[in-house]
Image (cartoon, grey):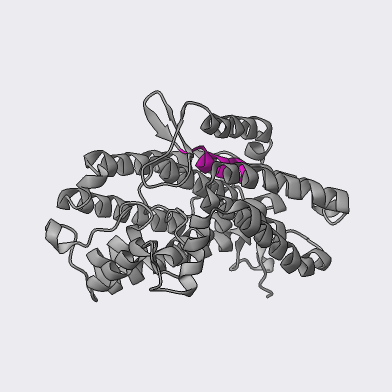
Amino acid sequence: MKSAFKKLPSGKHSIDYGLMIAVNICAIISTLLIYSIVRSGISESEGIGNSYWITQLVSMVIGVILSIIISYIDYRKLAKMWFIIVPASLLLMGLTFTSLAYQREGADDQAWIRILGFSLQPSEIMKIAFIISFSYHLSRDEEDMNKPVHMLMLLIHGAIPIGIVGIQGDYGTAIVFAAIFSFMLFSADISWKYIISLPVIAGGVVWTMWQFVLDDFHKERITILFHPGTDPENIEYQQDLGIKALQSGGVFGKGLFVGENEYIYIPEMHNDFIFAHAGQVFGFVGNLGILIVLAYMCLKIFADSRITRDRLGRFICMGAFGTMFTHCLMNIGMVLKVAPVIGVPLPFLSAGGTAMVSMYAIIGLVLSTYSHRAVTYNVFYDEDDD
């Protein structure tokens, strides 16, 4: 009697429940944290009212529904619709350079638009379009990707969204796009010749950005990290408050619904610095729990990339992994004062309806690759049963 793996038709729709549970835990915690800020009244000067936690809750519900709907759609069919998805996202990005655009309070860039009374951040939608289109490009071109002309086309594909958001002045999102591009590209069959040339290319890009693109204010945000406490313009004020808030929570935190005088006020504590507020609410133990859930989410996406039915599915999952991992790394690094403040939200935790729904849509793409695997494996199958 000889045991073996048997390939069986999957047939039924399946959901990666572990991934969905982790994502929903973060979204629920987010709504509670934002509600605690509103109830305490500590951020009334920023205009943080009930609409913020209600928007977060509604966005979570819409996101869950959207991700499940996407999971039922074959990701291969979605990828073939790139010629509709990409122009639509580019059109929305173009609107940020029109009279419909505005600069959100506390932000350095004009990356939002108002349509029919709703605020929208098109770069979040562009992330979905880029993951879909670049995955399709890689899957179609992987055999020839190491030829110079084909590699050049891939680089141009990646440079388009990076360049557009860079022109907006949204350098944080530009870095996220660069990371997504890198994770996807290096998950393909790229030649070692390109890999060893990466440090030189990256160094050239960083030097060019420093010399010709970044403003003095952005440079100071970076250099102050290497010389803390020597900040005459108080650029590190927000990060210092974030560290103070994290420390004030102690081991178990102050609780969700305490008075205004109990919380430490941090600018953008509902958004970019939500992790700092979580520290004072839930303490070290609570924040450690959040980190574990976020780490599980990222690792689960990476694990799903290893069981897809084809390379297209793998590239989609790696794009999703690059998105979530980079957002988590940059946001938490920003709060811990090991990265500059560049306005990158924490996935499923920072306030923002567009970001919440778009992140759920990206998770929906991962769920689609999980659901539409070609085969399942039965380890208990015995060949003698044939």
Residue 125 lies within the magenta run: yes
Image quadrant in which the C terminus is located: bottom right
Q: Which of 111/179 is in front? A: 111
Image quadrant in which the N terminus is located: bottom right
- Identity of the residue drawn at 52% across and 33% down: 96
Residue 291 location in percent, x, y?
A: 40, 67
Secondary structure mostly seen in the magenta stretch: helix
Q: Which of the 4 quarters of the picture holds residue 285?
A: bottom left
Q: Which span is picked out in magenta?
A: 121-130
Q: Which of the 4 quarters of the picture holds residue 245?
A: bottom left
Residue 225 lies within the magenta run: no
Q: Which of 374/186 is in front? A: 186
Residue 307 appears in view? no
Residue 276 location in percent, x, y?
A: 32, 63
- Identity of the residue drawn at 60% across and 47% down: 372
Q: Which of 269/312 is in front? A: 269
- Identity of the residue drawn at 23% across and 75% down: 250
User: Relative to residue 136, is residue 184 depicted above or below?
Assistant: below
